[in-house]
Image: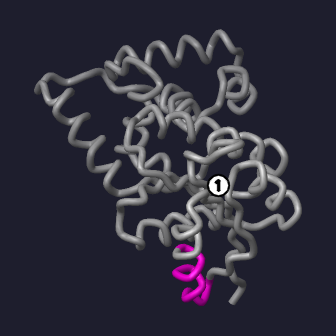
Amino acid sequence: MKKIRVTLAEDHETVRQGLRALLGTKEDIEVVGEAPNGRIACEQVRTLKPDVAIMDLSMPDMNGLTATRAIKEALPEVAVVALTRHVDDAYVQELLSAGASAYVLKQSPVEELLKAIRTAAAGERYLDSALVARNARAYLKRYSTGHSRPPITEREASVLRLMAIGHSNKEIASELDIAVKTVEVHKANAMRKLDLRGRIDVVRYAVLNGWLQEP
C-alpha cells in the first residue's frame, strides 16, 4: 500500500510531536517532515514534495494562510490541510480561496484530521464536520421562511461552485469558456435567487450541497 506522505507545520513543539506520534501509528500515513513556522514549511514542501501538507494557521515568521498560498503557487499538486482552532467563516473562506483542500479544527476528534488527510490526498475537499453542522444550522435558520425561491440554472450553479472553491471571475470564464461579463451576470442572478449576500454565504451554500467534497 502506497503511504500518504505528510509534512507538519505547527509552532508548538509538544503539539507537533503529538501529531507526529499519532500519525505514525497509521499504516497508510508517513510523516516525512515537520516545521515550526510557515517559511520552513514552504522550504520543506518544495524539497520533499509531500502528498499533503498539514498547516497550522497561527505561526511566527510566516502564518499558515501565507504559507498555503506560497505552496499552492509553487506546487499546486500538494494538498494543504489547514489545522486550527478558528471557527470563523472568514478563516474558512480565506483558506479555501488560498487553495487549501481541507479545514479541520484542533478541538475536533482526531478522526476529523485523518479523514481530511485521506480525502485531500485523494484530490477532494474536506470541511470539519463541526463547521458543516454549524453552518447548516445558521443557513437553515436564516432561510427557513417557508417561501419557495426560483431554481438556479445549471450554468449558474457551475459559476457558484467555482466561486466557492476560490476561482476568480476570469478563471471561471476560462473554465466554462464564457465571457467574464457573462460570469458576472450568472453570479448575480444565482445569488439574487438564493438570497446569498457574499462569498461566505456562497461557501456555506456549497457545503450544504456537498460541492466541497467533489474532486
Q: Looking at the image, which is closer to me, 129 or 8? A: 8
Q: How is the image coloured?
A: one colour
Quickly name the residue at label 1. 80
Asked where in the image residue 118 lies, by quadrant, the reply is bottom right
Reply above or below: 103 against 181: below
Residue at horizontal 75 percent and vertical 27 percent from the top: 174
Q: Does the magenta stretch include residue 26?
A: yes
Q: Is residue 58 left or right of residue 210?
A: right
Asked where in the image residue 200 lies, by quadrant, the reply is top left
- Residue 154 at x, y percent in the picture: 49, 32
Q: How many numbered discs sit on the rendered protein?
A: 1
Tag 1: residue type?
A: Val
- Residue 106 at x, y percent in the picture: 42, 59
Q: Is residue 140 magenta?
A: no
Q: Looking at the image, which is closer to me, 24 or 4? A: 24
First to last magenta residue range? 19-28
- Residue 144 at x, y percent in the picture: 15, 30
Residue closest to the far left: 146
Label 1 element class: strand
Quarter of the image containing the N terminus? bottom right
Q: Is residue 163 left or right of residue 192?
A: right
Quarter of the image containing the C terminus? bottom right
- Residue 157 at x, y percent in the picture: 48, 32
Q: In this view, does 29 lie to the left or right of 113?
A: right
Reply above or below: 97 against 211: above
Residue at horizontal 70 percent and vertical 49 percent from the top: 38
Reply above or below: 149 against 29: above
